[in-house]
C-alpha cells in the first residue's frame, strides 16, 4: 500500500514537469478560493488530455478518487496532469489541501462521455 | 426480579449520567471497580462560525458546557476532538477565537480536559497558534488502565500524520503490551470513510498498521459532524456529532454542505457523548443532546 502511494506521487510529479504533446488537448483549470473554474470538465472516453492547473492564491490540491489521480496546485506554477479516462460517467473531484473557510465546498466534476 | 448491571445502566440511563463503578453484578460484591470510568467527548465546536446553518452559534458551545456540567455524575475527564474554532485567514482573529474557546471551556467543572486540533484550527499555520494555547498537537496519557493516544492528522494541510509523528507512535505503541487497552483520539477518520469528500487521513493506513498488533484498540474521532461507527479488522472507529451543524451522510448529496438549521427543532443533530470504559476493552457510548427540546 505504502509503495503504491509512493509510486503514485512520483508519477504525478513527473507528469507535472512534462509539457503536453502537440496533439493532446489541454484543459485549463484555475483554482481560487473556493472554486475550480470550470467546475464541470467534459472529457472523452479514451482521449488523452492534459489537465493544466494554476492557483490564484494559496497551495491547493486536485483529487479525483474514482479516476485515481491527484496533484498539488502550487502558487506561481503551472501543474500538468496527463489523464486518459478509461470509463464513462461523472466523477467528482475536490481540493484535498485545506485552504480556508468553505474549502469543504471546493469541488467539481469530470464528465466522461 | 434481579436487575443485572446492564439492565441497571439502561434503566438509570433514562434519567442522565450513570456511574458504572458502584453497581454490582449479581453474585459479585458491591464494590467500586477502579478500572471502570467514563469520559465525555465533544467535537467540532467551530467557535467563531457565523452562518445560516447555526443561527445560535454564539450560544451552542456555552449550552454544551452547561449540559456537561449538569450531568449528575461528572466524567473523569473530557476530550475535544478538534475543530475547536472555525478557520480564518487572519492570524490575529484565529488567536482571538482560540482564546475565547479556551475561556468558555474553562467553565467546565471537570478540569482534566484534553484538546487536539482540527484542520480549522491548525491547517493554515501548521498549528502554530493552536500550540500557543494548548501545547502539543499529539501526545499520550494513561488513565485507569487505558492508554490514550491523541494523534494529529490536521497540522499538515494535506491531512497526513507524517513520518515524525508515525515514528513517535511506533515508539509509544512498542512500549505497550499486545493486550493493552488502547484508545486513539483524533480528528479525521484514520480509515478511508468517504475519500470522495476527503473524509480520510492521507497516511491513516500507516497508523492502523502500527495499531494492528494490539488487540484492544478503539478510535474516537470527529470531523464528519455525525455519529458513525465502523470497524477495520478488529479496530472500532466511532465518529462524534458536532456542536455547530450536522453534515450529510457520506455521499448522500453532491456537496458536503451543512444540513440546514431547523427552527422547529433547534440543535437537531448536535450533541456530545459519554463513553464508559468497561473491562476488558468495551466502550458504552451514550449520545447526549445540547439542550433538551
Image (cartoon, coloured by chain):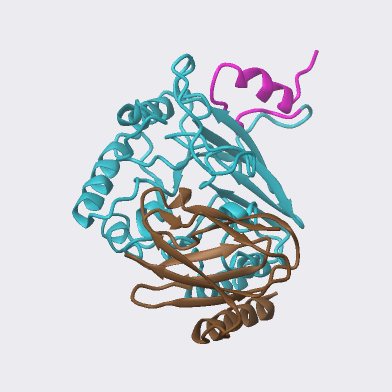
Chain colours: A brown, B cyan
**B8 is within the stretch colored magenta:** yes
Residue placed furthest toward the front: A23
Q: Quadrant of residue B35?
A: top right
In this picture, is B222 found above or below B273? Answer: below
Name the one closer to the observer, B214 or A67: A67
- Residue B150: percent from left, percent from top: 49, 58
- Residue B163: percent from left, percent from top: 51, 77
- Residue B216: percent from left, percent from top: 70, 56
Name the one closer to the observer, B235 or A59: A59
Q: Which residues are magenta?
A: B1-25
Q: Residue drawn 29% across and 64% down?
A: B128
Name the one closer to the observer, B28 or B106: B106
Name the one closer to the observer, B160 or B174: B160
Q: Quadrant of the N terminus of chain B?
A: top right
Q: Quadrant of residue B255?
A: top right
Is residue B282 visible to us here? no
Is residue B133 visible to us here? yes
In this picture, is B146 found above or below A10? Answer: above
Q: Residue drawn 19% across and 54% down?
A: B92
- Residue A85: percent from left, percent from top: 70, 68
Q: Residue drawn 56% across and 64% down?
A: A63
Horizontal relation, residue B91 to residue B238: left or right: left
Q: Overall secondary structure of the magenta stretch?
A: loop
In this picture, is B161 found above or below B195? Answer: below
**A91 is within the stretch colored magenta:** no
Q: Residue drawn 74% across and 29% down?
A: B25
Amino acid at each position: 500500500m505504502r509503495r503504491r502511494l509512493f509510486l503514485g506521487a512520483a508519477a504525478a510529479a513527473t507528469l507535472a514537469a512534462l509539457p503536453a504533446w502537440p496533439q493532446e488537448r489541454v484543459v485549463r483549470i484555475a483554482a481560487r478560493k473556493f472554486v475550480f473554474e470550470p467546475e464541470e470538465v467534459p472529457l472523452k472516453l479514451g482521449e488523452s488530455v492534459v489537465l493544466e492547473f494554476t492557483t490564484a492564491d494559496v497551495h491547493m490540491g486536485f483529487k479525483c478518487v474514482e479516476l485515481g489521480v491527484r496533484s498539488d496546485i502550487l502558487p506561481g506554477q503551472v501543474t500538468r496532469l496527463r489523464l486518459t479516462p478509461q470509463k464513462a460517467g461523472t466523477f467528482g473531484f475536490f481540493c484535498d489541501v485545506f485552504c480556508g473557510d468553505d474549502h469543504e465546498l471546493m469541488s467539481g466534476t469530470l464528465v466522461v462521455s | 426480579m434481579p436487575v443485572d448491571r446492564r439492565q441497571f445502566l439502561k434503566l438509570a440511563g433514562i434519567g442522565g449520567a450513570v456511574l458504572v463503578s458502584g453497581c454490582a453484578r449479581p453474585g459479585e460484591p458491591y464494590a467500586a471497580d477502579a478500572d471502570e470510568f467514563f469520559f465525555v467527548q465533544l467535537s467540532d465546536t467551530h467557535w467563531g462560525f457565523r452562518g445560516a446553518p447555526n443561527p445560535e452559534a454564539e450560544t451552542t458551545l456555552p449550552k454544551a458546557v452547561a449540559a456537561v456540567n449538569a450531568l449528575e455524575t461528572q466524567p473523569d475527564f473530557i476530550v475535544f476532538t478538534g475543530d475547536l474554532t472555525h478557520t480564518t485567514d487572519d492570524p490575529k482573529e484565529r488567536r482571538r477565537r482560540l482564546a475565547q474557546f479556551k475561556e468558555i471551556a474553562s467553565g467546565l467543572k471537570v478540569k482534566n480536559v484534553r484538546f487536539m486540533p482540527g484542520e480549522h484550527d491548525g491547517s493554515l499555520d501548521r498549528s502554530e497558534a493552536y500550540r500557543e494555547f494548548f501545547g502539543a498537537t499529539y501526545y499520550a496519557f494513561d488513565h485507569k488502565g487505558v492508554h490514550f493516544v491523541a494523534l494529529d492528522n490536521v497540522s499538515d494541510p494535506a491531512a497526513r500524520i507524517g513520518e515524525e509523528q508515525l515514528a513517535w507512535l511506533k515508539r509509544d505503541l512498542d512500549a505497550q503490551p499486545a493486550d493493552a487497552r488502547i484508545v486513539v483520539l483524533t480528528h479525521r477518520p484514520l480509515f478511508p470513510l468517504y475519500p470522495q469528500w476527503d473524509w480520510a487521513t492521507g497516511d491513516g493506513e500507516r497508523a492502523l498498521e502500527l495499531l494492528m498488533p494490539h488487540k484492544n484498540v478503539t478510535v474516537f474521532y470527529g470531523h464528519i459532524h455525525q455519529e458513525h461507527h465502523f470497524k477495520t479488522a478488529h479496530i472500532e472507529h466511532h465518529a462524534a456529532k458536532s456542536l455547530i451543524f450536522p453534515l450529510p451522510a457520506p455521499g448522500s448529496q453532491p456537496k458536503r454542505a451543512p444540513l440546514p438549521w431547523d427552527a422547529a427543532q433547534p440543535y437537531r443533530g448536535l450533541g456530545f457523548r459519554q463513553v464508559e470504559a468497561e473491562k476488558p476493552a468495551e466502550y458504552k457510548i451514550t449520545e447526549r443532546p445540547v439542550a433538551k427540546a
